[in-house]
Amino acid sequence: MSIAEKINSIQNQIRNHHCQLVAVGKTKPVTTLIEAYETGIRDFGENKVQELIDKYEQMPKDIRWHMIGHLQRNKVKYVVPFVHLIHAVDSVRLLSEIEKQASKIERPVNCLLQIHIAEEESKFGLSEDELFELLYSQDFLQCQYVRVIGLMGMATFTKDTKQVRKEFRTLKQLFEKVKERKDLPSHVQMQELSMGMSSDYSVALEEGSSMIRIGTTIFGSRN
């Protein structure tokens, strides 16, 4: 199947789910990503800052770039000027750095808070208690340029669909719990729930994902 055919197949699956497809091009050359762009894809994700910058500079400027990987604080300044959405914010310290860099150029930056839902220790993310602690922390309340627009999470990498479903369902329930709060800071709006990758996006769709991050299924294995 061509890249266009693969994208078309995914778009057909997500059509009834009001879900956004983010094409993840990590390790793939710009020429390959342009094939996806030519099918109409405008949301692209990268998990490494340098790769994100390189592709941003080479590709059309109507692309919405998603930083989907773990973001180190010392690299925030490089992505803040152009990034559309930072997916994996997992600490107040990282949010504070995003705020600091965004305030320098007076540009609001949309972020998702990463929640730890997997049974794997290697995954980053906040617990439920840490999430609420962050949302009402003094450092976060003082932010003027950071916008938290939802949550993201990564399920355990396993063939056990029941476990993956349970983890995604837990994240969806937490998303709704936050959304129902009447006293949220004004710069928090629960709009996006980013969950689901090539191996588990069909389950994520069934459990209420509004954004899936797909690389291998579109572009093949990483180089």
Image (cartoon, rainbow, N blue to C red):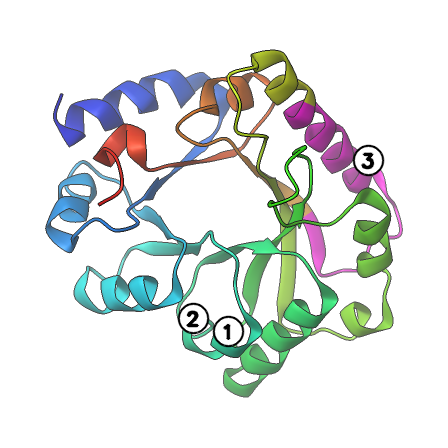
Comparing 61 with 88, the one in front is: 88
Q: Residue at x 32, y 37 (%)?
A: 215
Q: Position of residue 153 (x, y in %)?
A: 61, 39
Label 1 residue SS? helix
Residue tagged 1: 76
Q: Earlier in the sequence, mark 1 or mark 3?
A: 1
The amino acid on which the numbered mark 2 sits, given as a three-letter code, is: Val
Disc 1 versus disc 2: distance between alpha carbons? 6 Å
How crowded pointer 3 is (Cα within 10 Å; few <14, some 14-19, many 20+) is rated as: few
- Residue type at the position of mark 3: Lys
Indicate whether residue 185 is drawn in magenta. yes
Q: Are marks 1 and 3 in contact (CB under 8 Å)?
A: no
- Which residue is painted at 19% across and 60% down in the image? 59
Q: Secondary structure at mark 2?
A: helix
- The answer to whether 31 is drawn above or below residue 16 in the figure is below
Would you say the residues marked 1 and 2 are in contact, meaning their CB atoms lie under 8 Å apart? yes
> Going by the image, does 34 lie left or right of 119?
left
**Bounds of the magenta span?**
167-189
Mark 2, residues whose alpha carbon is within 10 Å: few (<14), some, or many (≥20)?
Answer: many
Mark toward the start of the polypeptide (3 vs 2): 2
Label 3: element kind? helix
Q: Quadrant of the N terminus?
A: top left
Magenta stretch: dominant secondary structure: helix
Residue 208 part of the magenta segment: no
Residue identifier under label 3 = 177
Say which residue label 2 marks.
79
Q: Position of residue 175 (x, y in %)?
A: 72, 36
